[in-house]
Amino acid sequence: MLGIPAVLDRVIQQATSQVLQQIWEPVFSESSFGFRPKRCQHHAVFRAKYYVEEGYRHVVDTDLSKFFDRVNHDRLMSRIAIRVKHKRLLKHIRKFLTSGVMIGGLVEPANEGTPQGGPLSPLLSNIVLDELDKELEKRRLSFVHYADDFVIFVRSKRAANRVMQSVSRFITRRLRLKVNEEKSRITHPRWMCFLGFSFTSKRGDTRIRIHSKSIKRLKDRVRELTNRSCGKSIHQIIFILNQFLRGCRIITVSRRVPTVFAPSIIGSDGG
């Protein structure tokens, strides 16, 4: 569930995030790309492509089960306290973590996890997984990390099995998180699904391709938005479809949508 803070809390969290980011950004791993300034999914995908070009043919794809809901508060606060000595700021962050959420007018306490939806939560997740990044760097492993998704590239199946077991053990015992054993696997770059992409190599030429699962989700969503029985006019459907194809958040459209929106969808920028 999303824990959306009140307006005043969002302002305070954003200010806190800007301060902490200046402290932690210089020490984050170069292989970490999620929720960081001047870094995005494209950079993570191209870093993975680089490792495939270097001859890494086995990928350890480890899935964290409900990562944002299972972050241990004590471990997180101890990590933050390494670089932040201001007691009032630490107390404020602890209150944010334990404030809980309101569901149906009733407040439910939070004993673990970082509430998704707040400006501070992405940075806290990076701080938690920075310990894993440092461990992988210590072992001199080639990896790419984006948010709670990370893949490790190795050259042999034997090394992949060894890395899978040791990394899973580190995550469980040291970080006190849970590994989803059903979704975690050792695979080939052709069959992996990292941020919706996989990689093919032919005669030394490595290419990025959209994974079949991503294409299927896209088609299913387009069929849902363009359903003839959805009760919307053609202009409303075009407007909503345009939002989806551009990657925008889809909003509810009233029946009085100006027809001026329709041409932009079939123009050069809409496809």
Image (cartoon, rainbow, N blue to C red):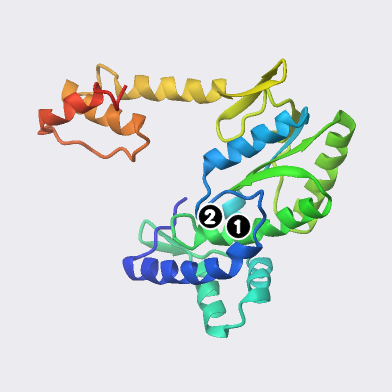
Q: Is residue 153 above or below residue 36?
A: above
Q: Residue at x 59, y 36 (%)?
A: 45
Kindly identify the amino acid type of the residue bearing the numbered disc 2. Answer: Arg
Give the quarter of the image for residue 174: bottom right
Identify the amino acid type marked 1: Asn
Quadrant the C terminus occupies: top left
Q: For the residue labelled by badge 1, is the local secondary structure a helix, a strand or a loop?
A: helix
Q: Position of residue 221 (x, y in %)?
A: 39, 25
Residue occupying image coordinates x 49% and y 20%: 216
Tell me whether circle 2 and circle 1 mark residues in contact (CB < 8 Å).
yes
Taking 196 as reference, is 164 left or right? right
Residue 128 x %, y %: 65, 60
Residue at 29% x, 26% y is 270
Q: In the rendered view, would you say 231 is above or below 194? A: above
Left or right: 160 as drawn, with respect to 124: right
Which of marks 1 and 2 precedes in the sequence?
A: 2
Extreme residue toward the front, this view: 204
Does the image show residue 99? no
Q: Nearer the viewer, residue 43 or 180?
A: 43
Residue extending farthest to the bottom is 87
Local SS, label 2: loop
Classify mark 1: residues with Cα within 10 Å, few (<14), some (14-19) or many (20+). many
**Figure check: 28 above or below 235:** below
Q: Which residue is mark 1?
A: 126
Q: Residues within 10 Å of mark 2 (few under 14, many from 20)?
A: some
* Residue wearing tag 2: 36
Residue 96 placement, left or right of 141: left
At horizontal 66% and vertical 28% (from top left) the residue drawn is: 192
